[in-house]
Image (cartoon, rainbow, N blue to C red):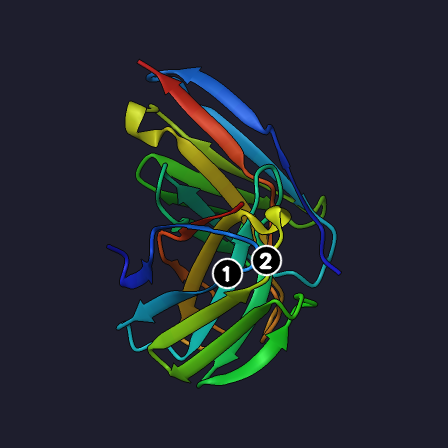
Amino acid sequence: ETGVTQTPRHLVMGMTNKKSLKCEQHLGHNAMYWYKQSAKKPLELMFVYSLEERVENNSVPSRFSPECPNSSHLFLHLHTLQPEDSALYLCASSQDLTADGYTFGSGTRLTVV
Amino acid sequence: GENVEQHPSTLSVQEGDSAVIKCTYSDSASNYFPWYKQELGKGPQLIIDIRSNVGEKKDQRIAVTLNKTAKHFSLHITETQPEDSAVYFCAASKPGYQKVTFGTGTKLQVIP
């Protein structure tokens, strides 16, 4: 374990479902991130939170809704997704926004059917 | 914005041989270059990084070199072992709060 825990590890959902991805870190980090990883593409930054405040929303469709209730937890709420949203969703954390190294979780493999 | 290109996309080497993965970046303001290793079923893990004020950094069997003039940096793995098999990502970022830009990844297979 890296210190960043993501649940669930796998998720299959229909296009009309609502589900949530959870990320938890106990590293004392102040910044948390959501990334989307698709085959043969670079990691795509989705959202950035610093001290529970969203600092970046990287042109992500509104069917993805993040929530950061405290500096240790990050959620990604999903609703009315499309099949092309199927991917590995990675959570990461860093000491702060200017810190260099990220600690990633193992990801949630999402399949939209 | 920054653009990071990574080559090759796949690489097969015999156990014990060396492996080299190369990346180029476009923004001369980038000054931090990490490398991540992603094993099957896991998230990327930082394995080594280099800042623009040095040209080379080593950590046991892995090393990274940086050529600021040419804007490229490389990961070198010597005496490869089967457990080195994974996908490796390079990345680049600028000072302060800036998005990290990742390469597309290299799938390394070490053949026993």
Looking at the image, which is closer to me, A65 or B87? A65
Mark 2 residue type: Leu
The residue that appears at 59% across and 64% down in the rendered structure is: A46
Instruction: Identify residue for label 2.
Output: A81
Q: Is residue A97 visible in the rendered structure shown here?
A: no
- Residue A27 at x, y percent in the picture: 28, 72
Which chain letter goes with mark 2? A
Identify which residue, B56 or A101, lies in the foreground: A101
Nearest-to-viewer mark from 2 and 1: 1
Q: Earlier in the sequence, mark 2 or mark 1?
A: 1
- Residue B25, compared with residue B62, is above or below; it is below
Residue B10 shows up from this direction: yes
Left or right: residue B5 compared with residue A38 = right
> In the drawing, does residue A96 fall left or right of residue B71?
left
Position in image of residue A98 (x %, y %): 51, 75
Q: Amino acid at mark 1?
A: Asn
Task: Give coordinates of residue B80: x percent, y percent.
Answer: 35, 24
Instruction: Place residue B86 in its image quadrant.
Output: top left
What's the residue at 39%, 17% (across, down)?
Answer: B17
Which quadrant of the structure image shows residue B70? top right
- Disc ID at residue A64: none
